[in-house]
Image (cartoon, rainbow, N blue to C red):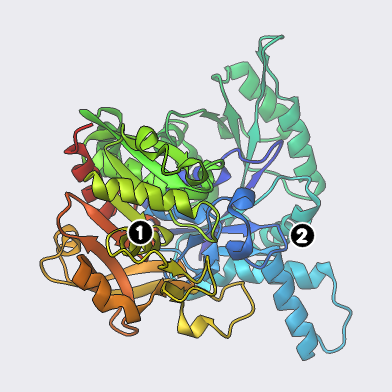
Amino acid sequence: MVKYIFVTGGVTSSLGKGIIAASLAKLLQERGLRVTIQKFDPYINVDPGTLNPYEHGECYVTEDGAETDLDLGHYERFLNIPTSQANNITTGRIYQTVINKEREGAYLGKTVQVIPHITDEIQRRVKLLAQNEEFDIIITEIGGTVGDIESLPYLEAIRQLKRSLGKDNSVVIHLTLIPYLKAAKELKTKPSQHSVKELLQAGIQPDVLVCRTEFPLPKELKDKLALFCNVDEQSVIEALDAETIYDVPLLMLKENLDKIVLKKLGIKSKETPELDLWKKFLGKLKNPTREVHIALVGKYNELQDAYKSIYESFVHAGASNECKVVVTPIHSETLSAENTVSKLKGFHGILVAPGFGGRGIEGKLEAIRFARENKVPFFGICLGMQCAVIEFFQNVLSNKDANSTEFDSSSDQPVIDLMEDQKKISNKGGTMRLGSYDCKIMKGSLAHKIYSKMEIKERHRHRYEFNNAFRDALENGGMSITGINPQSNLAEIVEIKNHPFFIGVQFHPELKSTVENPHPIFVAFIKASLSHPI
């Protein structure tokens, strides 16, 4: 029988439920158990695909084309296994399903209510992964905090599930904050007590308390929390602020979180997790022999989470190259022909990030021109690749009118154009080219050297593409299309030969980089950047 772990949070958001869930999952996985994680988000959007990056951070795309919460990226990076549509559910999707059933007459005229119809649908979604795959443990993270109005149906669904699953088949882990009052010079447990009280009012007794804290928790504080929150003393877990998120599995191992959970679930496994590869990665990450400086040119730089997977991919690639990658965000709206040289001359490499819309495009074009003309290693992702094509047409092929119809719908030189199957689409949600697609690589190209294979699969999220009507002009002018989707003939990879490292990709390689398998393009880009003098 599948066992279930529910992770809730209290006191404040952004405590790191996703990292705790992923860390526990990693420990259980390395004990030989089959584990997966899912995220339930309480907002009414059907998925994060239409959310502004400033609102929600990046939209993480799975192999099967689901637009999901960025926590799924943590799940994949830690567990090294792909997630899917079933791993991220929103309130919007829950209500959409129930309302569609009501419209179909599935409830036979009954009054549709939060209980039982919404809570039943939540429970069905919790169990869905158990039907499709064989797992020993399914971890479900509940977004938001206990006490939020939006979270109440999820808590009620958990209460009902715990009752129906029976004893020893589920565990509730509650993540909370132990704030430090500088004036009083002490840690305070009262916010956590109130948070647990909120959970108890929803009918749920937490089995484990994970306490985020800046300072170590003394035994008397742990005992106090255990007494007032009605949990075992050993089930009060200290979660100290970590140097890196990749330290957290080892910190949780030290606190015996995996042992405590397995005991409560009545599961026997390997005596200790096999974390040799993880420790080796951490050793390289914390003991770099060199340093490389990368400029990340984007237009959502105010919120680092907007490019979360890119930053984490640099961490993986840095460890692979045994170097520290120092990423400096540069807002493309601040770049101009007059200041680009002064702003970018001190970097070993330049990455132009993905995005949507015409804002900040001129700055991206200037950054690409600087990288191309000064032989600085360049890596363009999605919109970054499209901008590389536009810049090449404008400045190398002297076609000043070359543009994308995303920025200028009346352009008569649309080197980047709306995909043909997108032109009749009016609904924005979930309608882009999403998920994993094939790419055939040209033999002897930089991409071929990077991947060491000629057929790959990568994840996409875009509406616009390179316009093949301009392909001959582009390749005759010196930019090669070295990756093609064999089914649609769409350009996937572009390169410039007479350059130390210049590559643009239509897909999002950052979505497939993990601790155990750093993405080869990021690894190659950092390696090339290390060789560039500044």
Q: Is residue 164 left or right of residue 388?
A: right
Count neighbours of disc 2 (C-alpha within 10 A) and say few if under 14, some if 14 to 19, many if 20 or more. many
Instruction: Look at the numbered disc 2 and give the secondary structure of its residue.
Output: helix
One can see residue 185 in this view? yes
Residue shown at 33% from the left, 44% from the top: 350
Q: Is residue 354 left or right of residue 55?
A: left
Q: Position of residue 121 (x, y in %)?
A: 70, 71
Q: Is residue 89 left or right of residue 434?
A: right
Residue shown at 49% from the left, 38% from the top: 257
Instruction: Look at the numbered disc 1 and give the secondary structure of its residue.
Output: helix
Which three-letter amino acid code belongs to the residue tagged 2?
Answer: Pro
Q: Position of residue 526 (x, y in %)?
A: 25, 43
Residue shown at 39% from the left, 60% from the top: 387
Choose mark 1 or mark 2, whichever is in front.
Answer: 1
Along the viewing direction, whichever of 336 and 289 lies nearer the viewer: 336
Dot label at residue 491:
none
Along the viewing direction, whichever of 266 and 338 lies nearer the viewer: 338
Q: Position of residue 419 (x, y in %)?
A: 46, 79
One can see residue 517 in this view? no
Q: Position of residue 244 (x, y in %)?
A: 42, 33
Q: Which residue is mark 2?
A: 153
Quarter of the image holding residue 209? top right
Dot label at residue 391:
1
Above or below, 23 against 130 in this view is: above
Which three-letter amino acid code belongs to the residue tagged 1?
Answer: Glu
Which mark is first along the chain, 2 or 1?
2
Along the viewing direction, whichever of 368 and 32 lies nearer the viewer: 368
* Mark-to-mark CA distance, 1 and 2: 51 Å
Count neighbours of disc 1 (C-alpha within 10 A) and say few if under 14, some if 14 to 19, many if 20 or more. many
Residue shown at 31% from the left, 45% from the top: 370
